[in-house]
Amino acid sequence: MAAAAAAAARINFFLNHTNPLNYKAAAHLRTDLRFQRRRPKTTSFCTRASAAPLHDESSAAGGSDPFVLTTPLYYVNAPPHLGSAYTTIAADAIARFQRLLGKKVIFVTGTDEHGEKIAAAAASNASTPAQHCDLISQSYILLWKQLDISYDRFIRTTDPKHEAIVKEFYSRVLANGDIYRADYEGLYCVNCEEYKDEKELLENNCCPTHLKPCVARKEDNYFFALSKYQKSLEETLATKPNFVQPSFRLNEVQGWVKNGLRDFSISRALVDWGIPVPNDSKQTIYVWFDALLGYISALSEDTEQPDLERAISSGWPASLHLIGKDILRFHAVYWPAMLMSAGLGLPKMVFGHGFLTKDGMKMGKSLGNTIEPNDLVQKFGSDAVRYFFLREVEFGNDGDYSEERFINIVNAHLANSIGNLLNRTLGLIKKNCQSTLPVDSSIAVEGTTFKDTVEKLVEKARVHYGDLSLSSACEAVLEISHTGNLYMDERAPWSLFKQGGAASEAAAKDLVIILEAMRIIAIALSPVVPSLSWRIYGQLGYSKDQFDAATWSDTKWGGLKSGQVMEQPKPVFARIENPTEEENGKEAPKKVVKKEKLPQAKRAVEA
């Protein structure tokens, strides 16, 4: 216990004294860097398919095929930031929805832990690279637990099974004749971990992203023949428009490819913290050529001997890669070409989402406006954080956070429209029906159009979830609660109960109708707010096991039966007080919303 407490203390110290990760991707290699190719003699190599047939998604998902969903493997030069939290929340909502559909889901996340930048970050904190990676990787695991992230696999690129698969993949690409050595010279940005074109640099050869001088370097590196896959990538992007989404990201990728692909260096001679190049211990594999393989190595079971083919058979190709738009080039250009070279299938979709801003401004340390996801969850709870970013940011576009809008949206939707509707209905049924349902919900709704309205909204939500339109899915479910509130106001069952007789019976049916709608909301909104959804379901008299076993088919009307006993009414979502409100010219006292204790994560951490 003492050791665990000490580890937690170290993580908290690091989170409070280290800048959030600035996960910027390296730009493409430039043509003015001087190198001379020295191609090795190539040998024949049997791959599962030639490059051309790989454009065809003949391995379309069948009933037993898993839905493999991945976040980026987050770079551990600094603790998790709001951008990485946003991607993972979205991935979790998609994974939970697919599970509701009955799919076998493999939700992969993890950390990218090699490279010069990691070694530098460790040194700046008087730590070894391994210790640094352990600490930051654990901070991701802790944050994902706070955010109710239901991942199935957590892969670390320092995992021995990952290293084995990277080396096997590298050897396969080498045997296919797509790796060669070259003398390389240019200006190198340590933070970007890439060589820069002088034309893009600022004064004194400063990197325009990090505003630090680049250093002159000359190395003998290994290169991947990306240019060989120019036509294959053009054909893939033309014939498979869903491969890159949203569509405007596809246009961006097509523009890059059309301008001509250039081979890129896949090893570093001056970086010790990395996976050694097979048969050349003096070089390490470039972080991207290493990290992208994490999507495949994560599929290996810990009990198995690491093997590329076995990992592939466990679920590749992935159904969906979720990434930030800053790393689109690596996932939509480099990665598919690498897979083609190795004779492996391409992921079915790469979805690049936008960036988050705060109060309309880019977040950054210099502006003093960064948002720590740990602080946000501790202050408002996981339900509020998850709901706001999925409801208010159109997935794929940039989005903005302001605390005032955050509080207003969460209060209006979760506390008022959903929470208050449930609470006042349970209060009425307790007062007038002893908290026991007098009739089946399928009978109660007869003679009304309420059921038809709810069924249409549920179907809209299902379609939007499937299209990755998460904001629209939230809106469709929220509309069910709006419909319920309007129905309650129009029917006024509290008045009908006072009349007695047939009016009282009608009022009881009205309450059953609303509670059935709340049951449906709990299931349909569970991908977004799983903790809140369970609290709603629990108040309707169901057990946790029943909630966990629910599927999308349970959104069909008719679940609540006569005689079911409701729990005692209590608010399922406490209204958040706005600390910036002023009363009588004085700032209102700040009221901190305590985060509820979350259940232990059920999924195994594989790291």
Image (cartoon, grey):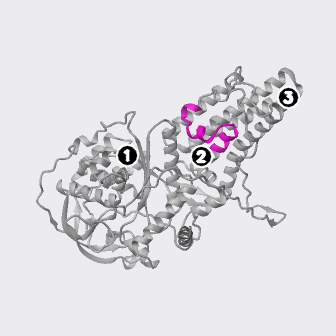
Label 1 sits on residue: 318
Label 3 sits on residue: 497
Q: Secondary structure at mark 2?
A: helix
Q: What type is the residue that disc 3 sits on? A: Phe
- Given the current orientation, which residue lies at the most extreme front position? 1
Q: Quadrant of residue 494?
A: top right
How far separated are the C-alphas under marks 1 and 3?
Answer: 56 Å
Q: Is residue 148 left or right of residue 571?
A: left
Height in image: 64 above or below 199? above
Is residue 322 visible in the rendered image? The answer is: no
Q: Nearer the viewer, mark 1 or mark 2?
A: 2
Relative depth, front residue between 293 and 260: 293
Q: Which residues are magenta?
A: 533-554
Q: What type is the residue that disc 2 sits on? A: Pro
Mark 3 or mark 1, which is nearer the start of the sequence? 1
Residue 424 placed where, x, y %? Answer: 78, 39
Residue 94 placed where, x, y %? Answer: 50, 44
Label 2 sits on residue: 530
